[in-house]
Image: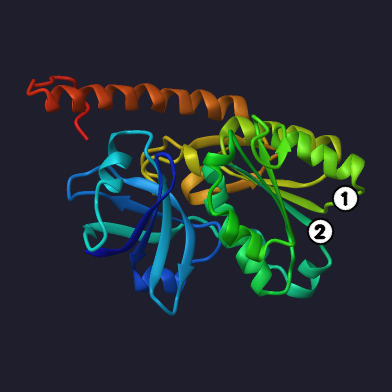
Amino acid sequence: MFRILKKRELAPDIWRMDIEAPRVAHSAKPGQFVIVRASENGERIPLTIADYDEEKGSVSIVIQTIGVSTRKIVALEEGGYLPDFAGPLGRESEFVHEPIEELKKKKILFVAGGVGAAPVYPQVKWLHEHGVEADVIVGAKNAQMHIMTEEMRAVAGNLYLTTDDGSLGFHGLVTAKIKDLIDNHGKHYDEVVAIGPMIMMKFVAATTKEYNIPTIVSLNTLMVDGTGMCGACRVTVGGKTLFTCVDGPEFDGHQVDFDEAMRRQGMYRTIEQRKAHIEAERAAGHKCKIGLDK
C-alpha cells in the first residue's frame, strides 16, 4: 500500500498527489512513468512522474479527471492509500545519458501543453540541477488552467506562458510562440522537447521541422496497460511499429505518425464514454450488462 502524503487541486479537475514510494523515488529518472490503481480490482492507469524526492521517499503525480478511473483516484484523500504504485517504467529521457559538458553547450526548448507541464517539470529540474538552463513554453486555454508555474519558473532559464484567450502571457498557441522567439527575438535552439495533447505535439513537430530543429515528443497519453502486453499503445515511428510503454514514451517527433496515433486515441475516448455510462447506471441502481466494468 502506498500512502497519499499530500493532495491539492492545481486547476479545475487537475490534481497533484504526493505518494510515499521510497523505492520508486530512489530509481526514478526524468521521462519515466508509474502505473497506479485506485482499488485492488481497479483499472491500471499510466501516469508520467511529475516530481520525485529521494530523500523524502516521495513521488508526485498529476491527474486530470477525464474518466471513471481517474475520478476514483482523485476521490482518495490525504492519509489514504493506493494499492498499486508500480514503477518507474519506460525509458528515461535520452539527455540523462549525455555528458553534462556537452549538454551545457546546447540550447534546449521545452514546450508543454496543459497537463504536459507536469512531466516537463522533472526534466527541466534535472537539467537545472546539473547546471543546464533550458527555456520553457507552457500553453493553456486560459490563465486558470496553468499549473506548476512557480515551480517551473524556479528551474527554467526563461519561462514563457501562453494562453488561447490572451488572459495570461502571450496570446496565441505555443507554435506561434516558438516562431516568435526564433523569428522576432533571435533565439536559436538545438533541440525541442514537446509534451502535451497529441494535436499540439503534431503541430509543434511540424513547426520545428521548418527550422530543422530535432524534436522529441512524449506519447504518454497513448498508454493503456503500461507493460507492452496489451498492444494498445502501438505507434509508427519512422515506418516501424513500436510500443509507447516499453520503447518510449519519448520518440523522435519528426518520425511519429501522429494521425495514426490520434485515431487510436479516439478509440479510447469511445470506450471511456461507455465506462462513464456504466458508472452512471450503477449509481442509479440499474444493472448494466455492457461488457466494460472497470
Q: Nearer the viewer, residue 126 or 215?
A: 126
Indicate the position of residue 284 as horizontal and vertical percent values: 11, 23
Q: Are marks 1 and 2 in contact (CB under 8 Å)?
A: yes
Quadrant of res 42: top left
Q: Nearer the viewer, mark 1 or mark 2?
A: 1
Vertical side of 128 occupied by 254: above or below: above
| Quadrant location, the N terminus | bottom left
Occupied quadrant, residue 239: top right
| Residue pointed to by mark 2 | 107
Residue 158 coordinates in the image, percent (x, y): 75, 57
Residue at the outermost bottom position = 55
Residue 134 vs 71, above or below: the answer is below
Picture colour scheme: rainbow
Residue drawn at (32%, 52%), measured in percent from left and top? 36
Q: Amino acid at mark 1?
A: Lys
User: Image check: 54 left or right of 214?
Assistant: left
Q: In the figure, is residue 29 to the left or right of 104?
A: left
- Mark 2: amino acid: Lys
In terms of secondary structure, where does tag 1 sit? loop
The image position of residue 4, as x and y in percent, is: 29, 62
Q: Quadrant of the C terminus?
A: top left
Mark 1: few, some, or many residues within 10 Å (few <14, many ≥20)? few
Q: Which residue is mark 1?
A: 187
User: What residue appears at the point 40 percent right and 25 percent down from the top-left corner?
Assistant: 269
Q: Which label's residue is closer to the chain start, 1 or 2?
A: 2
